[in-house]
Image: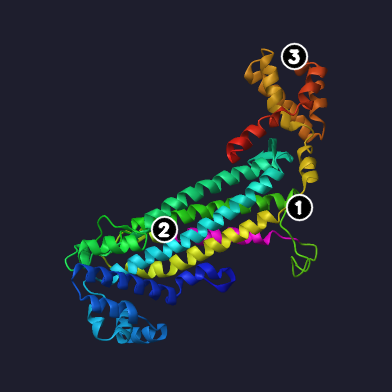
Amino acid sequence: MIPRYTRKNISNIWTDENKFKIWTEIECLIAQKLSLNGTIPKNSYQEIKKRAKFNVKEINKIEKETKHDVLAYIQNVSKYIGKSSKYFHYGVTSSDIIDTAFSIQLKQSCEIIIKEINILLKVIKNKSLKHKKTIMIGRSHGIHAEPITFGLKLATFYTEFQRHLKRLKNARDEISICAISGPVGTYNTINPNVEKYVAKKLKLKPESISTQIIPRDRHAMFFSTIGLLASSIEHMATEIRHLQRTEVSEVEEFFQKKQKGSSSMPHKRNPILSENLTGIARYIRSAVVPAMENITLWHERDISHSSVERIIAPDVTIATDFALSRLTNVIKNLIVYPNNMKKNLEKLEGIHKSQKILLSLIKKNVSRNEAYLIVQSASKKAIFHDMKFEKVLNENKKFKKYISKNELKKIFSTKEELKHIDKIFKVVFKN
């Protein structure tokens, strides 16, 4: 991932330094258990543990000749270990190390992403509670519907990201797997108790059955979950973009003092952060299909998945971490315009009461179809002639037969649309 969208904590996970550090930890644990099993001498394990170290530059140089990263790594570490190096990487195959380390890197990344979701949830909750009673018009198909509150709108996103938090925890468990079963997964050259021992030490779960690699449906589940998360990031970002449009102007991204919105139009204050999140979400989702295609490999293994994972694993987790942090910042600093929300709510002169009036007519024993046609006709006249909806209804002969002016006035003055807001918030926030 390019530096522009990279944060250090998560990018460090995907460095060669960290990867080889994890490889070394795995190799030392394997040697430790082999020594406990009596397979290799205990003093050889002690030598491996004491002397095992690596040099990234040297490994890269060796790999240019070997064309094999694990063999280059083994050759480099063996130089430091000395005589006991013959027991380093004993009885295992490359994928045992690569895949188990990959699990750890994904798990480490997942922990950071989970932490970022929790921070985002807290920010959304605070903003939602603050605007619990900030009334605005609800929209369906982009058209005025009935009143909601801005806090309620945010509360729906809160529950959406709560679901992602649960999914991501499941995905973390799905990929927290250790597989040390030797060539083609038969344990022919390594005792199965080594896998269990290493898994326990690394806080992973042993793979129940593997080929020569950890089955890639696990990883596909992880990247699919990240793809879903990205879609909700875009969902929220798109909502902000719509609400910031000039003709709506109900919210606005924070605009810094020296910030500029356009090279040619000085008045511009564009929702660039939300637009950026929309773009990043598209990129993150693009990894889902390749991750699924990685499931299909030849027989017990091939390496067609490897190049894909070397690209998407660091890039997608880094981009997701960045996107969550950016979205949190957007919501935390979001400027809300309650007066504009009220202005937009009242723009159509009470049209949002149409369903309430429809139900009132039905209560007067008017058929639903007739009641619908009466209200639809009146609302159309009010919109196209820029008239108050209440006035149009009071002048409608069919309507007047059933509902008096005083009854209609009472309907328009009621705020019953929002009478269950407290109940909804209690369910969402459990307080």
In the rendered structure, are the residues bearing label 3 and label 2 in contact, judged by CB atoms less than 8 Å apart?
Answer: no
Q: At 46% from the left edge and 69% from the top edge, which residue is drawn?
A: 13
Q: Nearer the viewer, residue 197 or 388?
A: 197
- SS for tag 1? loop
Q: Earlier in the sequence, mark 3 or mark 1?
A: 1
Q: Mark 3 and mark 1: span between their CA atoms?
A: 41 Å
- SS for tag 3? loop
Q: Please provide the residue range marked out in magenta.
A: 269-289
Badge nearest the viewer, 3 or 2: 2
- SS for tag 2? helix
Q: Is residue 273 visible?
A: yes
Circle 2 Cα neighbour tier, 10 Å, few/some/many (<14 / 14–19 / ≥20): few
Q: Is residue 226 above or below residue 417?
A: below
The residue under label 1 is which amino acid type?
Answer: Thr
Q: Residue furthest left?
A: 188
Residue 51 % position (x, y): 33, 82
- The residue tagged 3 is 402
Q: At 48% from the left edge and 59% from the top edge, which residue is drawn?
A: 111
- The residue tagged 2 is 289
Q: Mark 3 and mark 2: span between their CA atoms?
A: 59 Å
**Residue 160 colored magenta?**
no
* Residue 246, disc: 1
Q: Nearer the viewer, residue 114 or 403?
A: 114
Q: Nearer the viewer, residue 134 or 117?
A: 117
Q: Is residue 258 above or below residue 218?
A: below
Q: Is residue 300 visible?
A: no
The residue under label 3 is which amino acid type?
Answer: Tyr
Q: Mark 2 and mark 1: span between their CA atoms?
A: 37 Å
Q: Earlier in the sequence, mark 3 or mark 2?
A: 2
Q: Is residue 80 left or right of residue 114?
A: left
Circle 1 Cα neighbour tier, 10 Å, few/some/many (<14 / 14–19 / ≥20): few
Location of residue 308 (image quadrant)? bottom left
